Image (spheres, coloured by chain):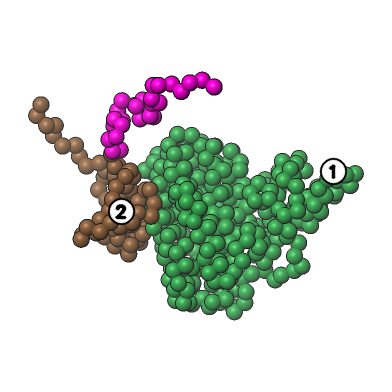
Amino acid sequence: MSAGLLELLLENSPTATEADLAATLRELTAAALGETADLLQDDDLQTALFLAYELRYSGLRGVDDAWEWHPEVLALCASIEPEFEKALRERALMPELPEPGVESVAAALFELTGSDTGPSVSRYLAKKATDEQAQEFLILRSIYQLKEADPHTWAIPRLRSRAKAALVEIQADEYGGGRFDRMHSELFARTMRGVGLDATNGHYVDVVPAITLASSNMMTMFGAHRRLRGAIAGHLAALEMTSSQPNRLYGNGFRRLGYNADVTFYFDEHVEADAVHEQIAARDLAGSLATDEPELLEDVFFGAAAGLYVDGLSGTQQLDAWTAGTSALRATETSSMPA
Amino acid sequence: MTEPDAQPAKRWDDQWEDRPAIGADEPVSITAYPNGPLLVRGTFEILTPTGEVIPPRRKTVALCRCGVSTLKPFCDGSHKAIGFKTEQEPPAPQPPLPT
Ligand code: FES
C-alpha cells in the first residue's frame, strides 16, 4: 500500500483518476492494517507513514507540497496512527508513576533510563564493529539524525511556561546556537561524508528495516499531536539521558577504525551537549510539564518508555545481525522512494 | 514617511526594574542540579589554571562536580555511573546578618 500512496502522490494534478486511486489506497491501507502481524516491523505500513510524514519535513521529490494537508493523506495517517499508538502503549514497559513534581519526575526518569539494560550497540561499536558494520550503523542512524531535533521542535508551540523555555534552550543548542555548521544534523552529515556515505536526506530509506522507520515515525507522531505533548517531552528526556556515554563509545569506535576528528566530532560533541541537555530535559522540561499539567504525567513516562522500547528492539536486531555475520540493513528491492 | 523621532528607542531591559541598567553585565547564573553537574548560564569565561580561555562550545554548560568526568571541567554524564549523590539543595539557611 505504500506503493499505492506514491501512485496517488505522484498524480500531481487532480484528475478523474485521483478519486479512484484514493479509494484504492483506503482499501489497501485497511487491508494492510488488518493483515499485519506486527505494525512496528511492517515495512509497508511504516514506509507509508514515513512518506506521509516526510511531506511535513523536506517534502518528496516530484510530489506537490500541497499533498501535505490533503484530506486523503491526513486520513491515511489517521488510520495508521491509532494502531501504532496502541501497539506502543501495549508494549512499552511502564515504570511505577511518581507523584507529579520536578524532583520526583526527574528522579523517576533517571531511574527508568539508568535501569535500561538494553543491548549495547555502543559497546559493540567501540570494541568489535568492522568498518562495514560502522557504516551500516551510520546508515541506520541517518533516518533520524539527518533531521535531528526536528520532531521534538513540533512541541515548542504546544508547550507553555517553564517547559517551553526548557525545550527552546535544548533545541537552540541542537541547532548549533544558530550556526549552520554547528547544527547537529549538519555535523552528522559531515560524519557520513567523512566515511564516504551519501548524506542526502532520504537516500537510505529503502535499505533500513521497518523498526528504524518506526522509531522516526514515533517521534513525528508524538511531536505533531498536541494531545501527545507529554509523550514527546518524555521521549526527548529519555533520548538525552541515554546519550552521553554511548556517544563517547561511538566516537572511540570510529577512532579505533582509523577515522579522524572530522568523522568523530559529531559523537564527541554529543558527549558534552547531552550531559547538559539531560539535566534540562529531565527537570525543567519533563519535570515542569508534569508539575504544571499533572494529567500529562503518565504520557511523559509513556513517551520515555516507548522510546527506550523501540530503540532497544532496533539495537537488538542490529546486534543479532552483526554477531551472526549478516547485514543489519534490509535486503534491497527495487527502489520506490523518490526522495 | 514620518520624520524619525529624536527620542532614542528604549532597550528591552529598560522596562524591568529588577534587571541591571543598560551597560551592566547580566549576572551569570549557576544552578546546582541534584546528583549531577552545575549548569552555568550567562556571559562567562572558563579559564585553565594557567589562565588560558577554554573556548565555549555552547551557551549553557554543565560543570562536573563529581570528579570523574573524562571531559573536565565539563560533565560527561559519568556521575550517573558512579551513583553520585548530592546533599539536599539549597543548603540550610544561614543566620541573618545583623542589621
Ligand atoms: S558531574 Fe557529571 S560527570 Fe561529574
What is the residue that sits farthest to the left in this orientation? B98
Residue A168, position as x, y percentages in the image: 46, 42
Q: Is residue A96 above or below residue A200?
A: above
Residue A147 lies in quadrant:
bottom right
Number of the label disc, if any, that sits on residue A14: 1
Please state, as top left, top right, bottom left or bottom right, where the C terminus of chain A lies in the image: bottom right
**Residue shown at the point (52%, 61%) measured from the top left:** A188
The chain letter under disc 2 is B
The chain letter under disc 1 is A
Hue used for the chain lettered B: brown
Marks 1 and 2 on same chain: no
Residue A310, position as x, y percentages in the image: 57, 58
Residue A214 lies in quadrant:
bottom right
Secondary structure state at the residue bearing disc 2: strand
Residue B1, position as x, y percentages in the image: 54, 22
Q: Which residue is mark 2?
A: B63
Magenta span: predominant SS is: loop
Say whether residue B6 is magenta: yes
Left or right: A202 as drawn, with respect to A31: left
Hue used for the chain lettered A: green
Q: Tell me the kind of residue under disc 1.
A: Pro
**Dot 2 beta carbon under 8 Å from ligand 1:** yes
